[in-house]
């Protein structure tokens, strides 16, 4: 009786081809074994194939042995261990900022930082396609949210001008590499506009940390615009293969967040092994700085195979490659057909992407060799053309 409203919602989702379930995979990563068969997984964010890297696992184990499984308290109580500090110092240095702050996840980094930067009476200008974690953070902040057309610096300029006389703080938020489209924001233009209008700028580098820039430091660093970007946000859960989120910023901003970011204060400090793994991933990035450029060269090649066959990969310029199908059911059917051929390519449907733009979202990782990419491209091309 009290729950009889639930089933109609689930039935409705199913009727629209939008049913969701957390399917169990026997392993994680870009190349996995299912029922004894090798499967290419194009839905893993383990871009640099570090999730089972011996050094990364060693550093996780060392931290586990030294400190135990949990940090046993929140950061401001007694949960901050030497490795939390070591990681923050290291991230700040790599990213080219004065300081850094680690959060429990990328979601929490956004949920904690954005409401600390802007609140009631302030304005947030957000790209139309920013990640759900940023949108949720904006809602939590109480600031007025103004959206601008995706990756369109002119649209942002118009919005900023429209509110030029508005009181309160202004914050512009964007991703660098967009999570669903794999395209890249015009960061230099956006940074210049934010500066002109006295707005802060926060860039979510979840998908460009580790995969672009010197030692995988990201696109802000590659473009040398650290001074024009107030907050550089990233996650340890994608190219760094583990878990946890972080931001790099100025010292005063870090101090402010320590005082006011609720997603930092009211939660347990990330466990030691997770922090150890992140340090291990940074070691690998420093020792083998070309990983990101190899990944991008492979992704460029794969994209060109799809494009030469007439497939639409939108404006992708990264290891994230969408193949637009359009119809929800058709996208699902193609994904299932590929699965039978040993390829995991998730069908991404609304509301994660705009209605009518259901797609396969392919993540290229270093677990995929050039031969694998050629074989996968052939399968995808033929499934899309027949589908
Ligand atoms: C994955 C992702 C996040 C969240 O990071 P988690 O560490 O998985 O919580 C935030 N922003 C973007 C753009 C992402 O793709």
Image (cartoon, grey):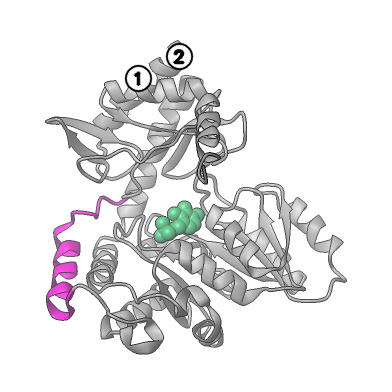
The span from disc 2 to disc 1 (Cα, nearest Å) is: 9 Å
What percent of the width, then of the height, locates residue 160?
79, 62
Mark 1 residue CB less than 8 A from any atom of ligand 1: no
Element at label 1: helix
What percent of the width, then of the height, locates residue 104?
39, 69
Residue 355 located left or right of residue 332: right
Residue 362 located left or right of residue 35: right
Q: Which mark is residue 387?
A: 2
Residue name at image x 27 percent, y 64 percent = 281
Asked if the magenta segment contains residue 50, the reply would be yes
What percent of the width, then of the height, locates residue 342?
25, 26
In magenta, the rendered stretch is: 47-68
Q: Which residue is mark 1?
A: 337
Q: Is residue 269 above or below residue 19?
A: below
Crowd rating for badge 1 (residues with CA inside 10 Å; few <14, some 14–19, many 20+): some
Mark 2 residue CB less than 8 A from any atom of ligand 1: no
Give 243 or 162, whichever is nearer the viewer: 243
Give 358 or 10, whichever is nearer the viewer: 10
Residue name at image x 56 percent, y 63 percent = 203
Q: Report the residue that reaches farthest toward the front.
A: 1
Q: Report the residue that reaches farthest toward the top.
A: 386
Element at label 2: loop
């Amino acid at each position: 009786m009290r729950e009889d409203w639930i089933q109609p919602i689930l039935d409705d989702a199913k009727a629209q081809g939008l049913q969701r379930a957390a399917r169990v995979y026997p392993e994680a990563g870009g190349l996995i074994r299912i029922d004894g068969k090798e499967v290419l997984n194009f839905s893993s964010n383990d871009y640099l194939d570090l999730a089972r890297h011996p050094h990364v696992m060693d550093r996780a184990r060392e931290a586990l042995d030294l400190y135990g499984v949990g940090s046993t308290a929140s950061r401001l109580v007694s949960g901050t261990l030497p490795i939390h500090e070591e990681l923050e110092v290291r991230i700040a240095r790599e990213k080219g900022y004065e300081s850094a702050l680690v959060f429990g996840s990328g979601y929490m980094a956004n949920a904690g930082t954005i409401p600390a930067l802007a609140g009631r009476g302030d304005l947030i200008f957000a790209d139309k396609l920013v990640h759900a974690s940023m949108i949720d953070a904006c809602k939590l902040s109480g600031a007025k949210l103004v959206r601008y057309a995706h990756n369109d610096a002119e649209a942002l300029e118009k919005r900023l001008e429209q509110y030029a006389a508005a009181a309160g703080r202004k914050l512009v938020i964007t991703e660098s590499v967009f999570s669903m489209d794999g395209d890249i924001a015009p960061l230099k233009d956006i940074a210049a506009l934010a500066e002109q209008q006295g707005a802060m700028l926060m860039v979510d580098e979840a998908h460009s940390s580790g995969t672009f820039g010197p030692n995988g430091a990201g696109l802000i660093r590659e473009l040398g615009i650290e001074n024009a970007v107030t907050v550089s946000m990233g996650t340890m859960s994608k190219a760094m293969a583990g878990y946890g989120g972080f931001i790099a910023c100025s010292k005063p901003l870090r101090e402010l967040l320590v005082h006011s970011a609720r997603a930092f204060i009211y939660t347990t400090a990330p466990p030691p092994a997770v922090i150890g793994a992140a340090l291990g991933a940074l070691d690998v990035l420093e020792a083998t700085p070309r990983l990101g450029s190899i990944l991008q060269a492979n992704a460029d090649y794969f994209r060109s195979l799809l494009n030469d066959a007439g497939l639409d990969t939108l404006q992708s310029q990264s290891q994230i490659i969408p193949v637009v199908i359009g119809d929800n059911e058709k996208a699902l059917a193609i994904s299932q057909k590929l699965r039978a051929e040993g390829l995991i390519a998730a069908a991404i449907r609304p509301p994660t992407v705009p209605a009518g733009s259901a797609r396969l979202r392919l993540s290229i990782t270093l677990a995929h060799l050039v031969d694998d990419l050629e074989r996968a491209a052939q399968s995808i091309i033929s499934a899309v053309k027949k589908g």
